[in-house]
Image: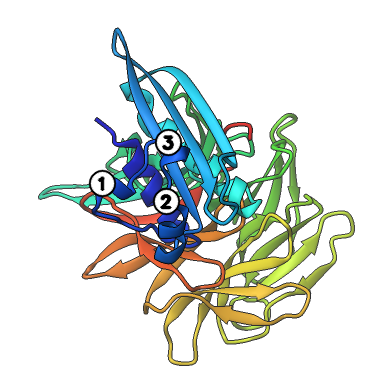
Amino acid sequence: VENIADIVKRDLHNSGHFRSLDVAADSKNPRAIKDIDFGFWKNYGAAHVVLGSVVPRGHGLYDVSFQLVDIYKNNTEPLLSVKFREKHLREFRALAHYISDLIFKKITGVRGFFSTRIAYITVDRYKHETVHTLTIADADGYGDKPLLSANYPLMSPRWSTDGKKIAFVSFLGGRSSINVATLENGRIEQLTKFPGINGAPAWSPSGQKLALVLSKDGSPKIYLLDLVTRELQRLTNGGAIDTEPYWHPDGKSIFFTSNRGGKPQIYQVVLQTGEIQRVTFIGNYNATPSVTPDGKQLIMLHQSEKGAYNIAVQDLSTGKLKVITKANLDESPTIAPNGMMVLYGVREADRNVLGAVTLAGKFRMRLPVQDGNVKEPAWSPFLIEG
């Protein structure tokens, strides 16, 4: 049985913005607001206390309730008091994440990401074959389920704007193609299979277009595919390699990686005019762009002077860059839909795992994942109203 309290505690701790306090004495673990020793909790360093209960209602159903109390207000009125009626055990994990979302937003004012999901590729090597699996899991790495397994490479999963589909690259038959999987029924539709590279799909904020990389006319270039009319529009030109498109949240421009200046750097193309500007100037290698939901900060893979590949954040107004991870070989940063955390791939003990780091770089963690190499994570948008 999923322990709701444990999941909520882990969610809030792993956000990097909270620290949970364990108290062994049962007398200090109140069941109601009237039982709270406000002086004790203040001295103990707690700012908030969460009270919760799970009451069986028969037929395998339970009522779940919780209250969020501000210790420094020292009164009997909770900040939050919510009750969920007749929930089944199988709903407890999702319910716990939703409770975490409610608590996080009430305290920080920012929407929590705990009810969102992640997608990634796992690579398992057996005696006679290598199996690639497109996997979906909760944002905390638990509840993982395979969406597609194949004995050919799968790459670049990207969530649709509404969170109902995932675009990805397949090498079925030894040739790359861009496909879209519908999560509700598992149906897979092939969108492109031009000669050469078909890669790096990226959904527009409206969900009506897909930016992608094709080399059908020579060097890899950024194209736009209208998902309604299937009309294809070429965005970039020249002999350079242009790849890894990422939409600005306003839908008016696209960031991408290019070696047009000699070394991989990040550029921005304005859709209405076709004007292209270089965005990154610090270091010899900056790639894999993504942008915070407020459009103010650029997340990227940055090579340091020592040669390590790390995740970095650049302020788009000032150009100031900050490296926020410390391993030697990070990859594929993807940002939470609330803009407060980055998920990424990292090499650890001869295998690829998933790491997460706050945007300030002050809190880092590893996600629990199964055996095999795990790479190319993609964070979903918000999936439920809230």
The residue that disc 3 covers is 32
Q: Residue at x 37, y 33 (%)?
A: 93
Judge left or right: residue 250 versus residue 48: right
Q: Of the residues under marks 1 and 2, which one precedes in the sequence?
A: 1
Say how the picture is coloured.
rainbow
Of circles 1 and 2, which is in front? Answer: 2
- Cα separation, mark 1 vs mark 2, equals 12 Å
Q: Amino acid at mark 2?
A: Asp
Of circles 3 and 2, which is in front? Answer: 2
Judge left or right: residue 15 versus residue 274: left
The residue that disc 2 covers is 37
Sort mark 1 into few (<14), some (14-19) or many (20+) by Cα contacts within 10 Å.
few
Judge left or right: residue 357 versus residue 250: left
Q: Nearer the viewer, residue 23 or 122?
A: 23
Can you say whether 307 is above or below 230 in the image? below
Q: Of the residues under marks 3 and 2, which one precedes in the sequence?
A: 3
